[in-house]
């Protein structure tokens, strides 16, 4: 499940949004283990972040489980009983997108006294389980902007100093192209030049209509 900012609900792609009491939002992404499909788990997000080394890496007391495709409801209930766990969430898959996907993915709440590590050890060799993983937490780095002048003597029209967001990845040549990937210099949308004029407003709504519409 993946969560970003905002207060809405999402489906598993694996993405789900949930409003927090402080107005922020949290996210969770359900991954498969290495060797399966490449997906990512995002457990929760918050703009108020503690020191990096003090932050938890998983949601303790929860596991994400995918059952075998042939599992009957009675077998699923037996699986839950063997852990003393309850289902916190079931993820729905659009059949037209996941035609080859079978089985069920669930987020389980473990009982008191059973750690996530212990539950994963029990599920590792369970014939009813396709895979089981912890509900991992990934934190977004806070994007900061500072009012700093362009570099002295710079001839780069995109050099706007510290006002450029610190998450502008050099690989995103479409925003600012210096030919870093062998492309044509300045073949981009001039994003830094736009940021030099304004960094936007919460009162302005922007909609992006893609070819899927």
Image (cartoon, helix red, strand yellow):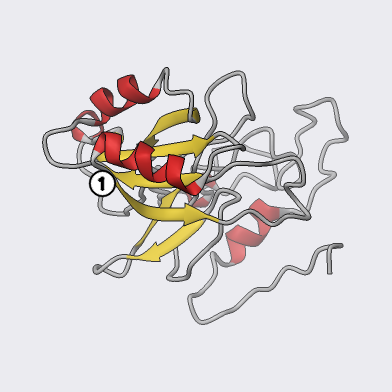
Q: Position of residue 36 (x, y in %)?
A: 62, 24
**Which residue occupies the foreground of this view, 37 or 100?**
100
Query: In the displayed structure, does residue 83 sit left or right of residue 156?
Result: left
- Could you tell me which residue is drawn at 44 percent across and 45 percent down? 74
Which quadrant would the C terminus be assigned to in this image? bottom right
Q: Quadrant of residue 123?
A: top left
| Residue farthest to the front, as pictured | 74
Task: Examine the rendered structure and indicate whether residue 197 appears above or below residue 181.
Answer: below
**Which residue occupies the foreground of this view, 165 or 133?**
133
**Which residue occupies the foreground of this view, 179 or 62?**
62
From this viewpoint, is residue 205 visible?
Answer: yes
Query: In the displayed structure, does residue 140 sit left or right of residue 83?
Result: right
**Which residue occupies the foreground of this view, 97 or 53?**
97
Query: In the displayed structure, does residue 196 sit left or right of residue 186?
Result: left
- Could you tell me which residue is drawn at 61 percent across and 37 percent down? 69
| Residue farthest to the bottom, as pictured | 203
Q: Position of residue 195 (x, y in %)?
A: 60, 59
Name the residue carrying label 1. Answer: 49
Q: Position of residue 173 (x, y in %)?
A: 74, 39
Q: Residues within 10 Å of mark 1 (few under 14, many from 20)?
A: few
Q: Secondary structure at mark 1?
A: loop
From this viewpoint, is residue 59 visible?
Answer: no
- Could you tell me which residue is drawn at 72 percent across and 47 percent down? 98
- Could you tell me which residue is drawn at 51 percent across and 44 percent down? 105
Task: Examine the rendered structure and indicate whether residue 65 appears above or below residue 99.
Answer: above
Query: In the displayed structure, does residue 74 sit left or right of residue 53?
Result: right
Q: Position of residue 179 (x, y in %)?
A: 80, 30
């Amino acid at each position: 499940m993946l969560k970003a900012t905002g207060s809405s609900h999402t489906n598993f792609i694996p993405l789900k949004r949930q409003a927090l009491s402080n107005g922020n939002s949290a996210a969770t992404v359900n991954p498969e283990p290495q060797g399966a499909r490449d997906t990512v788990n995002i457990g929760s997000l918050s703009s108020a972040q503690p020191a990096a080394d003090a932050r938890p890496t998983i949601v303790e007391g929860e596991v994400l489980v995918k059952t075998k495709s042939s599992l009957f409801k009675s077998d699923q209930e037996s699986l839950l009983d063997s852990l003393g766990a309850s289902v916190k969430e079931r993820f729905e898959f659009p059949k037209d997108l996941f035609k080859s996907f079978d089985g069920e993915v669930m987020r389980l709440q473990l009982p008191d006294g059973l750690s996530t590590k212990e539950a994963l050890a029990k599920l590792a060799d369970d014939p009813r389980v396709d895979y089981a993983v912890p509900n991992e937490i990934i934190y977004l780095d806070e994007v900061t902007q500072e009012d700093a002048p362009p570099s002295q003597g710079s001839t780069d029209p995109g050099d706007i100093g510290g006002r450029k967001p610190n998450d502008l990845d050099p690989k995103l040549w479409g925003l600012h192209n210096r030919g870093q990937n062998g492309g044509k210099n300045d073949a981009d949308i001039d994003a830094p030049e736009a940021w030099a004029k304004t960094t936007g407003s919460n009162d302005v709504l922007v909609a992006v209509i893609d070819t899927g519409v």
